[in-house]
Amino acid sequence: MGRFIVRRFLWMLVVLLLLSFLTFVLQRAVPGGPFDREKALPAVTVEMLNEKYGLDKSFWEQYALFLYNVAVPRVMRIGPFSFEIQADLASELDQKVISPALREQFQKNGRPLSEQARIEVKQAGSQWSIVDKDSNRRYTIRREEQALKVSGQDPDPSNSVMERYLVSIPLGGGWHFRWINLGPSLQLKERSVAEIIQQNLPVSFQLGVLALAIAVVIGMPMGILAALRQNTIWDYLGMSVAIFGVSVPVIAMGPILQYIFGVLLQWLPPTGWGAKPPFIAGLFPRDYTWDGFWKFTLMPAFALGIGNSAIIARLTRASLLQVIREDYIRTARAKGLSERVVILRHALRNSLIPVVTILGPMFAAVVTGTFVTEQIFGIPGLGRYFITSITNRDHTVIMGTVLLYAVFLILANLVVDITYAWLDPRIRYE
């Protein structure tokens, strides 16, 4: 099993590489760019933006830079720092000019200034500050005898649990192991892709897990009952409910639930989300009270889960009907085992393989954001960012969300394969 997991992990890297390349190609095959608007920007502005984000480079240079930022780890020091620069740069600081000489001094001390860096004069001739929004650093500069002393604090990327484990791992002594830099959003000012995922994935994850739990809790018993009571009122009723669940999309189910439970009965809030950061392990809410979590989640989770429960019910019924006609089920009954033991220990366990198969991609789909559900219920999830990033041609957000979905899908399918071996002892991975 260990060798199988290692092989699957290596294949996952290959799949992610191919998927990133394909996504990169398709993004640039679409006419237009991320800075095209109905009201066109000045050509000079577009040129400056393309240069800032590296879009003026060739396709292969852009892709190589993306792979470097995502795949190549780096170790960097984060915390307070200070260094000295030449005193004759004071006149340039007074004039708020970032000259090549000033840039060279900062570059030499490992703190390069970006194009967004701006000088603020606190006291002419003796005290200044430089704010660099691109690197999220603020430098304080003071005149000290024969030199100018620069001091500041590097931003700590591990303030959130999510980023600590996925993007930056603290090593101690101010040093951090940094990895998976998805870059800045091309449309959302001063926001990185990692920031968007960190802030919005937990909400989509919580909604998706609860919706999937509702789907399994409703779908499996309904499918089992329909199979065991084939061609009875329970079978017809269960499959009618399943057909209804498949036929009515979230875009119709959501407003119906909002009107009944939110407007008429006023039992649940029609929109909004209760859980607030910080989250446990970056994903799970800390407050599971009715007012803090459940009253906001039940309605959207049910609207999202009812359609999936219908799929699970129909699949469970079909699979169980096939299994209970197998020879080993007749043998188990002939041995005198009770019907309950035959169904639960033998038939149901073997009939779950098709159901488990569909749960993998279903899990990946619901936990990474569902645009329609989030829009209807006003949920600040990740789904809307994925859809709007496509319409806005926000290449970095598209790439980040696509790779995130792929990782969830691959890991979910790995869990499915491992579950196969538990459900059917004949399956072995060597």
Image (cartoon, grey):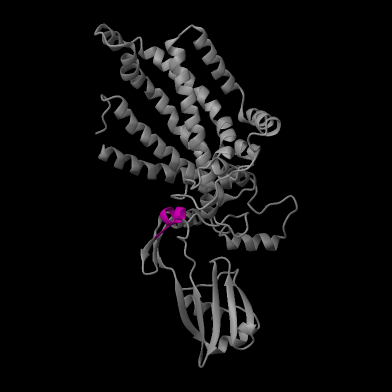
The correct choice, above or below, for 194 with respect to 258 in the image is below
- Residue range of the region highlighted in magenta in the rendering: 161-169
At which x and y percent is residue 342? 31, 14
The quadrant where residue 267 appears: top right
At which x and y percent is residue 189? 63, 58
At which x and y percent is residue 10? 34, 44
Tell whether position 299 is magenta: no
Residue 243 seen by the camera: yes
Give left or right: position of 262 versus 135: right
Q: Quadrant of the C terminus?
A: top left
The correct choice, above or below, for 118 with respect to 342 in the image is below
Residue 24 seen by the camera: no
Q: Nearer the viewer, residue 191 or 253?
A: 253
Q: Residue at x 49, y 46 (%)?
A: 285
Give left or right: position of 404 versus 325: right
Q: Residue at x 66, y 83 (%)?
A: 95
At which x and y percent is residue 201? 52, 46
Tell whether position 165 is magenta: yes
The correct choice, above or below, for 42 with respect to 16 in the image is below
Q: Quadrant of the N terminus?
A: top left
The quadrant where residue 188 appears: bottom right
Q: Nearer the viewer, residue 148 or 239?
A: 239
Q: Residue at x 45, y 76 (%)?
A: 81
Q: Residue furthest bottom?
A: 145
Give left or right: position of 141 versus 170: right
| Prevalent SS, magenta region | helix
